[in-house]
Amino acid sequence: MNILIVTMGMGIGGAETHIIELCRALTSRGVIVSVASAGGELVMALKESGAHHIYAPLDKKDPLSMMRSSVILSREIKRNKYDIVHAHARIPAFICGVLQRRLGFRFVTSAHYDFRVNGALRKMTDWGEHTFAVSDDLRRYLLREYGTCGDNVTVTVNGIDTGHFSPSTAEDIRSSLGLREGEKMILHVSRLEDYSSLFAEKLISAMPEINATTAAKAVIIGGGEKLDELKTEAERINSALGREAVLLLGALSDVRDYIRACDVFASPSRAALEAMACAKPVIVGGSQGYIGIFDENAIYRAVSTNFCCRGEPLVQSDVLARDICRLLTSDSAYLTALGEYNRRFVLENYSASRMADDHMAVYGRLASVKTRCSEYDALICGYFGYGNMGDEAVLRGLIRGLRERKPDIRLCVMTASPGKTARAFCVDTVYRFDMARVRAAMKKSRLLIFGGGNLLQDSTSNASLRYYLYILRSAKSCGMKTAVYSNGIGPVLEAANLERIAAALSACDSVSMRENRSFELAKSLCPQNKNIRLTFDPVLLRESDGKNDIAGTLGLEKGKYFVISPREIDRFSMKKLADAANLIAKKYGLRPVLIAMQRGEDLPVCRALAGDIPGSFVATENTDLQCVLALLADAAFLISSRLHTLICATSAVCPMMAYSEDVKLRSYLEYSGIAEIAGISPSADIKSTPQEIGNIADAVISRRTEIKAHIRASLPTWRALAEYEFSEMIKLIQ
């Protein structure tokens, strides 16, 4: 595999060190790695890692430099035919994103920290086809600020070379720093810029208080515009104490021996992990917040922010002095045990090998995907490109299932947002209403995959039904096989439309329906078609990864809240839903949480409902599918007006009820057996009173143990039904 990494420069910094460690781990596995950057102090270390360096002025934002960088990168990409291009900063990502649209290479990015966001910067920021985030909070930041699909974000680690950073003595370093016998050394490593010097400032001001308890010297490594100012303050402190208690060394490219020499290490981010790998007691804190002494009680706060402390209180000199003094005066057995714990933690969770595994998995998957094909195995038609989380999850599940069975499958998707869909799913695309191009794609495709969803209905409009029936007829006229996949039928308001649907389904090579009512209707409409099957929606195949404590992040207590997933309804019906939610919240002591499955349409509804439901919470930033699954897994139950939220609740084993006029929700609850266990239909409609909605909620909550047991017992069978369809479609392709 041949990889090009693109970053601004290779000066001294955490992201730059991350790149070196990644290069070292990748080259050790036989991967050819090149790095394009503006150069810097760490270029030699980069070359020693086995990577080749290419110069480009990627650290400059002026148009001329960016154009020059673009020319250099374009030439390199064409010449070397890289399998993956991987950008590590905003300017390189922007340039690579532009080139990718022209040259068609596989493009990924890494998020090392949060950027300043405004309208223009948000539009120019390109996160590629997949993004590596170095912490959970950065993943949430990408979802919240950029609307990134959670499935296209991998949370990886800041991999540490635990062979290089390992316990050892460094008496020569202590001697060179002028440390006297019995004097303790506190080490801080960070850039000393306006935005990152706060911790160093607090450490310097804390030294008189620390030295009142024990003799200690603070050694600060780092360069930047604040260095001279901090040196002046250090001289003042040293003069007041009558000895050198603070020493600033400036920027250094290799700090390992200084880490080995210190008694306490106090820094954020990657530097903290390097010190932990050296078995040092560590205080985690920086310019973005302060956690304190790292031990098992600090794991969640440290890990969730990649040891950067984002969202934590800023450090105060007295608190810092207290924690440092606690470590400096502790007995050696405690400090040894703490150091051993820290190293073991890094070995188990932050190895460079694990980081390389994460990257190789994504690289391999993307490199195997074929796009810009002259012929396609399948053309996929559905309600895609509109930002509906359920429909996008259907598409993702479909593509994933097909690629698992045929890794080299060639796919094209009909979508309302060709560029966005192409990026999100690594497929070729065609605008769904450009019928000339749709017909052209049909003529070079073997199979039309039609679905999933309730595409065959006229309640939206007759025009919608005519469009989808035209697609089915056109596919047949182009000689394609046709597979109606995980569909539903209805509502159908005109009898003539049922005849049209029957004619279309009769000609299909494969038909699968996602609930029993549509299955029975399809069989009655097309008795001669023996290829009609009952299946389950592929969203059911998605499971919570177990890593996302979204409830805790939002300040919610597990089992002490319920979820409402609404869609647009009239104001009167919305008020009834709000009144019912208030009744349920009061009766059971549960907090209402609102989620938007189709952000553009549902978020205003969520906000309007929240105004009528005191104490409710709108989960506006946590609407990717993994977050929804995690939120539902810890919820008491769900009220949903969206079918795919019900399906997500099934996957998350969450009791549920519906509030909708749409028959497909009631049909799903009946098909899944939840209606039978609840003892009454767990589906209310807009004619229901708040009390009637509350009565259904009572029935579901009172039988929640039985409902959860039924779902757990049934899930293997339901998922097997959903998986079966992928194999059937591969047969049609072959």
Image: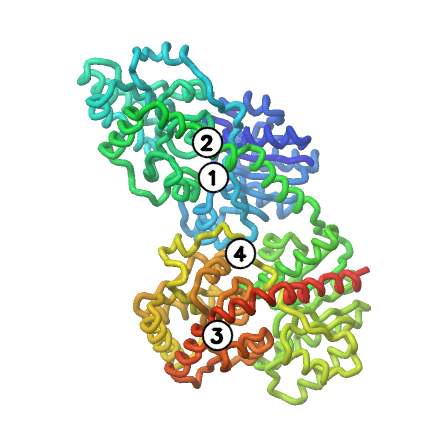
Q: Evaluate if marks 1 and 3 touch, with contact meaning CB atoms under 8 Å apart.
A: no
Residue found 31% across the figure and 72% down from its top: 586
Mark 1 vs mark 4, CA separation in Å: 25 Å
Q: In this rendering, which labeled residue sits more in front, label 3 or label 2?
A: 3
Viewer-nearest residue: 86 or 634:
634
- Against 35, residue 641 (above or below) is below
Q: Residue furthest bottom?
A: 495
Mark 3 vs mark 4, CA separation in Å: 21 Å
Q: Evaluate if marks 1 and 2 touch, with contact meaning CB atoms under 8 Å apart.
A: yes
Answer with mark 1 or mark 4, whichever residue precedes in sequence: 1
Q: In this rendering, which labeled residue sits more in front, label 1 or label 3?
A: 3
* Tag 3 residue: 657
* Tag 2 residue: 14
Q: In this rendering, which labeled residue sits more in front, label 2 or label 4?
A: 4
Answer with mark 3 or mark 4, whichever residue precedes in sequence: 4
Q: Is residue 515 left or right of residue 582?
A: right
Residue type at the position of mark 4: Ser
Mark 1 vs mark 2, CA separation in Å: 9 Å
Is residue 433 visible in the rendered image? The answer is no
Viewer-nearest residue: 33 or 345:
345
Answer with mark 3 or mark 2, whichever residue precedes in sequence: 2
* Tag 4 residue: 544
On residue 112, the disc is 1
